[in-house]
Image (tube, grey):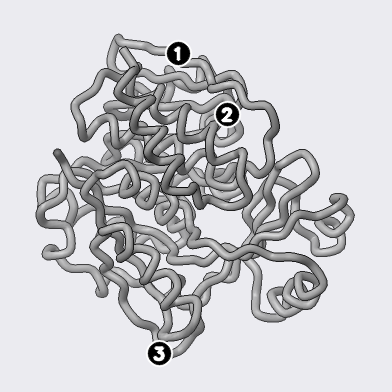
Amino acid sequence: MDKIIGLGNALVDVLAIIKSDEILTEMQLPKGSMTLIDEDKLQKINECFSQMKTHLATGGSAGNAIRGMACLGAGTGFIGKVSNDFYGNFFRNSLLERGTEANLLLSTTLPSGVASTFISPDGERTFGTYLGAASTLKAEDLSLEMFKGYAYLFIEGYLVQDHDMILRAIELAKEAGLQVCLDMASYNIVEGDHDFFSLLINKYVDIVFANEEEAKAFTGKEPEEALDVIAKMCSIAIVKIGSRGSLIRKGTEEVRVEAVPVEKVVDTTGAGDFFAAGFLYGLTCGYSLEKCAKIGSILAGDVIQVVGTELPAAQWEKIKEEIMLIE
């Protein structure tokens, strides 16, 4: 089976369920977005969270996806940067206990990154992200050795603020013979760095994951048309359309897969990451595009029914059984 390595912001999610969206306005966080925050804003959020019940989980888009793949039994690795502190150790231990090779570099200047996650009554999640040590991962930290032995590199779009680092990672991955997968991450990130996303997808990226908001921010078009545009630029294009499922295009082959119906959406944190995890796991097993997307739908459907992105071991066993039954 092929192995996958993720490159992303090594973050710990601190999650809280909020009674109303008023607090998002107060904190100046657009609902459903990921907003980068400074230490002062983090302190304000921490004060607010100190009066609420919070839940800790390893986070970061690529981190979530890699963890999902590892729980399915895929060979995985992760490259990121943390500090030698509570959150950094929490992140490292979480990778290692699932058998993921942890290429975690250490920052001596900033604390480990934290994603403060507000879960609205409708299950939508909003992130106030303090990158901390994660933001100090630089092009010169990367080496060819890190990528050897893997077949795919999964990059989260949240990293695009450092163009040199992303380009270096892709250059090394291609030199080591890897296919490059990019998750667009968030519509506001795509809007803010549109030209660079265009360069990456046109020139380097093999597999693109986008939800409908990100696809629209990138192409200006609705999902079906956006899929066509993106598919002309890369090998496989995936546009996720929420409760309506997903659209996949590879060359002339197009697949539409329904979402798995769920009784109650508790928290959408990690839904896209887990879809990517299931889809890429399927690719490493050599499954059809349709089966890959169905696995992605199962994982996404399960993760939106829990707070955060931790599924119990028994649930993973059930998922593996469901995968075996997919035609």
Along the line of sight, which residue is nearer the eye, 283 or 68?
68
Discs 2, 3 touching: Cβ within 8 Å: no
Does any portion of residue 200 appear in the rendered image?
no
Report whether 17 appears left or right of 9: right
In the rendered view, tell whether residue 277 sits above or below residue 61: above
- Cα separation between marks 2 and 3: 39 Å
Residue at horizontal 54%, vertical 41%? 303
Mark 3 highlights which residue?
A: 108
Mark 2 highlights which residue?
A: 212
Q: How busy is the neighbourhood of tag 2: few (under 14 within 10 Å), some, or many (20 plus)?
A: many
In the rendered view, tell whether residue 34 sits above or below residue 134: above
> Residue 91's spot in the image, x, y percent?
42, 69
Along the line of sight, which residue is nearer the eye, 85 or 9?
85
> Residue 107's spot in the image, x, y percent?
39, 83
* Disc number lying in front (1 or 2): 1
Residue type of the residue flagged with mark 2: Glu
Report whether 33 appears left or right of 313: right
Q: Where, by quadrant of the figure, is residue 41 drawn? A: bottom right
Q: How busy is the neighbourhood of tag 3: few (under 14 within 10 Å), some, or many (20 plus)?
A: few
Residue at horizontal 41%, vertical 63%? 162
Residue type of the residue flagged with mark 1: Arg
Q: Earlier in the sequence, mark 3 or mark 1?
A: 3
Q: How busy is the neighbourhood of tag 1: few (under 14 within 10 Å), some, or many (20 plus)?
A: some
Discs 1, 2 touching: Cβ within 8 Å: no
Residue at horizontal 46%, vertical 19%? 247
Q: Which mark is residue 256?
A: 1
> Residue 220's spot in the image, x, y percent?
58, 27
